[in-house]
């Protein structure tokens, strides 16, 4: 074995001292070292004399020498030559490193993170709840008793084992869970996935993401709601965006409103995205209905609060001008990788 090591060292030295400048040199080298009766074959043949317990080590050594000799030949052939003959010729340190493919964040995650961070700066903390909900938290406590017509607004997936269970249709259910804990004042956002039995199309899906907001304290007013959402919109979309509130109806808020922003695509001029109105709706909101507070054991004479709920997909579509909601759940890398550096 020692013999073999010495032999190889010696050959390496010899090779490193060579410069193969022309075809003849190259061919001579090939025949001498790499040919069928060449040195490499010869040394390989000596493997059989190596004791069994050293075979593995010797094999590695020989293999390295083989790569060394072959690459010396290859590089000489290409007229490159070895740049630093003192370094192990096995490693060409001048080669560029291998770059690893970098993944990218999902656009929904990017927008979700941005929404969450804006509200965290305002002192909201994150609350989460189960995606499989019971009727009380998803509907009844939110002032949608059985047979309430507004239940039809949200086509529900029920769970067959138990008629009381369903896939939550909105993150408003988390409001209830948090209010029931009774720790006031309460200032939370509830991000999460929700489910509705809708036909899948470019504008609707059977699952999507919402961020719910809730603030309960003494003397909370509609002005607080407006200011909070106004701050949010400016942080999210920039200072130039305009906001308007329209009266609306939700069973769990009174008064209720929907908030529009000036269309980011056409700047309010009117385009297909805003259906020529110059405005796009981004969320629902209102003052928490006193009945909802009472349902959760909160004294509605003492406390007031506001709530809002927005769809993350919708905001993502507006931010990146994505026209088809289905792209978000198809996992097509060609789509997803476009958001690598997006904020
Ligand atoms: N839960 C409503 C929905 O899914 C959104 C919403 C509207 C949430 C008004 C609220 C709110 O908290 O006050 O469409």
Image: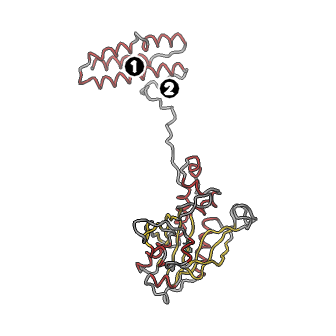
Frontmost residue, 231 versus 334? 334
Earlier in the chain: of badge 2 and badge 1, it is: 1
Element type at mark 1? helix
Quarter holding the C terminus is: bottom right
Q: Residues within 10 Å of mark 2 (few under 14, many from 20)?
A: few
In which quadrant of the rendered view does residue 66 lie? top left
Q: Residue at x 48, y 10 (%)?
A: 28
Q: Residues within 10 Å of mark 1 (few under 14, many from 20)?
A: some
Q: Give the x, y percent position of residue 249.
A: 60, 78
Question: Within 8 Å of ligand 1, the CB of disc 1?
Answer: no
Question: Within 8 Å of ligand 1, the CB of disc 2?
Answer: no
Name the mark on residue 252.
none
- The residue furthest bottom is 301
Label 2, on which residue? Answer: 83
Q: Is residue 287 above or below residue 211?
A: below
- Asked if one can make out residue 120 in the rendered structure from this viewpoint, the answer is no
Frontmost residue, 38 versus 264? 264
Q: Residue at x 44, y 25 (%)?
A: 89
């Amino acid at each position: 074995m020692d013999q073999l090591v010495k032999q190889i060292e010696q050959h390496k030295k010899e090779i490193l001292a060579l410069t193969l400048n022309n075809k003849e040199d190259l061919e001579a080298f090939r025949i001498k070292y790499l040919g069928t009766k060449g040195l490499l074959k010869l040394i390989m043949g000596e493997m059989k004399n190596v004791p069994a317990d050293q075979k593995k080590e010797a094999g590695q050594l020989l293999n390295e020498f083989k790569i060394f000799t072959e690459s010396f030949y290859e590089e000489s052939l290409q007229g490159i030559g070895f740049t630093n003959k003192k370094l192990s010729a096995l490693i060409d340190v001048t080669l560029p490193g291998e770059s690893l493919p970098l993944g990218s964040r999902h656009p929904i995650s990017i927008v979700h993170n941005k929404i969450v961070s804006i509200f965290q700066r305002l002192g909201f903390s994150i609350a989460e709840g189960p995606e499989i909900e019971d009727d009380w938290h998803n509907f009844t406590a939110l002032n949608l008793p059985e047979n309430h017509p507004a239940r039809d607004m949200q086509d529900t997936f029920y769970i067959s084992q138990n008629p009381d269970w369903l896939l939550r249709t909105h993150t408003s259910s988390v409001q209830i869970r948090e209010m029931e804990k009774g720790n006031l004042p309460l200032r939370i956002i509830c991000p999460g996935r929700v489910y509705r039995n809708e036909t899948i199309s470019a504008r609707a899906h059977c699952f999507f993401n919402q961020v719910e907001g809730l603030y309960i304290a003494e003397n909370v007013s509609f002005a607080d709601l407006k200011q909070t959402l106004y701050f949010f919109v400016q942080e999210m979309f920039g200072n130039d965006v305009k906001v308007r509130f329209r009266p609306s109806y939700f069973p769990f808020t009174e008064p209720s409103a929907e908030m529009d922003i000036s269309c980011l695509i056409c700047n309010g001029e009117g385009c297909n995205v805003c259906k020529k109105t110059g405005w796009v709706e981004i969320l629902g909101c209102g003052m928490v209905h006193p009945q909802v507070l009472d349902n959760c054991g909160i004294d509605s004479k003492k406390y007031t609060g506001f709530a809002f709920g927005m769809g993350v997909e919708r905001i993502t579509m507006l931010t990146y001008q994505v026209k088809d909601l289905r792209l978000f759940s198809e996992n097509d890398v060609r789509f997803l990788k476009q958001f690598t550096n997006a904020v």
